[in-house]
Image: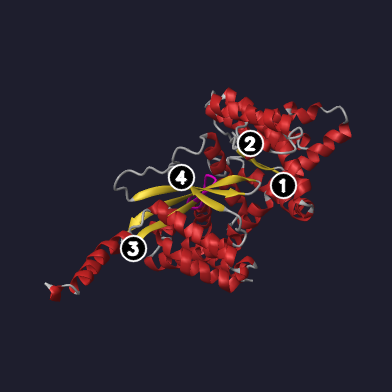
Amino acid sequence: MTHRRPFAPAALFAVALAFAGPLLAQEAPDALVKRVSQETIDLIRSDPKLQAGDPARVQEVIESRLLPHFDFSRMTQLAMGRNWRAASPEQQKRLTDEFRTLLVRTYSNALTQYRDETIQLRPFRPEAGAADVTVRTEVVRQGRPPVQIDYGMTRTQNGWKAYDVIVGGVSLVTNYRDEFNEQVKAGGVDGLIRTLADKNRTGAK
Amino acid sequence: MTLRPLAWAALAAALLSGCATTTGSRDDPLEPFNRAMYAIHEPIDRDVVQPIARAWLELPAALRQPVTNFFGNIDDLFSGVNGVLQGKTEKAAHDFGRVMTNSLYGLGGLIDVASGAGIPKGEEDFGQTFGVWGIPHGPYLFVPVFGPTTVRDGTGVIIRAYTTPVGYLEDVSARNTLWGVGLLDLRAQALETQSIVQQAALDPYTFVRRAYLQRRAYLTYDGRPPTPKEDDE
């Protein structure tokens, strides 16, 4: 019996890992939103560089902490609506890349304005086994009305990913659908790609 | 900064030009006219209104917060009235409770005691009431200096402008000052959002229009708007 003892903890550990792997990957969407939001706010609060809006540091935090939880391909596809099918795979890739850059840039500017906020989850009752949910949160700020921020999320093999952000009822995807549609009408898919690329270049200054 | 003549003029002009215009999207049949209004608005807003609004934000919060609260108190009064008109009695009770609390214990509304006590704001208005009654929002309108609205919401704003307690002030200059400061404070609060729009939008006109219409639908349906159909025109 004694010779088997050392193996028992190792076996238990292996079993635990086998269970924890998928469990960690499939952290519930509301728990994921809460955790990532809170960690980001805590990080800003403790990092003077972020508070000062140091672009490199802000970019780094967004890339490492937030982007892994977004599905930009789905986001771009939804914003394109029926125009998505009119785009070639190569155009689709460029669109996704440029759209991603635009959103990151926009978010970089907004991010450093956060500080005293706290995130609360609003009631959330997804259907059992749903692969697409809306996580509802409320951002509470001192002396100002709370802002509702909701996340449209989809289940993937790598955990839940956000494909839409809805601020006070304004869905990012819906808003861009009008913009994209207008650009495609005026200059085709290539026209839209050009507009996005130009916007990203001027925003970089 | 007076709202009434401007709003009326724009509304009249919009309705007149509406007879002739057919282009634009379903929500914005007056798009060419609205874009012309936007072109008038943009430089006035950038060169006159925004600098004033930014200067206002330089004042200490201790001075600005009572202004925000004072007009918030009037908002709550109208929200209560509209809650009743929509049959939302619980919301209305909260709003009237807020008005009483803040007027009595918050120095006539200068201090928002009710929020501290956790009484929620209803955020109802006439435009939402019309929506709940089944009146469609009608053509989208862009009014220079005032900003985005619709025929339905604009009508609500005009009704409110004619019934607000501020309008009952006898002293004209005091009344106008109060109007001005209230609008300025509102405008200043929107500066942050505006800078994000500038960063995010490919075409700020389109971006603001969709954001406005989404926000209004969200408010009208109390945070549960019906899912819009894929709008391919």
Badge 3: chain ID: A
Q: Is residue B220 above or below residue A32?
A: above
Circles 1 and 2 in contact, beta carbons < 8 Å = no
Q: Which mark is residue B231?
A: 4
Q: Chain of mark 4?
A: B
Decide which of B41, A189 is in the foreground and name it: B41
* Between discs 1 and 2, the one toward the N terminus: 2
Whether tag 2 and tag 4 are in contact, CB under 8 A, the answer is no
* Dot 1 and dot 3 residues touching (CB under 8 Å): no
Q: Which residues are magenta?
A: A166-174
Q: Residue at x 32, y 48 (%)?
A: A130
Within 10 angstroms of label 4, few (less than 14), some, or many (20 or more) residues? few
Label 4 to label 3: alpha-carbon separation: 32 Å
Residue at the front extreme, as displayed: A2
Q: Is residue A97 above or below residue B4?
A: below
Marks 1 and 4, how far apart in space?
31 Å
Under circle 1, the secondary element is helix
Give the label, 1 or 2, closer to the camera.
1
Q: Is label 2 on the same chain as label 4?
A: yes
Label 2 and label 3: CA atoms lie apart by 52 Å
Q: Which residue is mark 3?
A: A158
For numbered disc 4, what is the local secondary structure? loop
* Vertical comparison of A184 with A138: above or below: below
Sequence-first disc among 1 and 4:
1
Quarter of the image for residue B20 reads: top right
Marks 1 and 3, how far apart at CA: 43 Å
> Disc 3 on helix, strand or loop?
loop
Q: Nearer the viewer, mark 2 or mark 3?
A: 3
Mark 1 vs mark 4: give the one in front.
1
- The reply to whether residue B6 is visible in this rendering is yes
The disc at residue B187 is 1
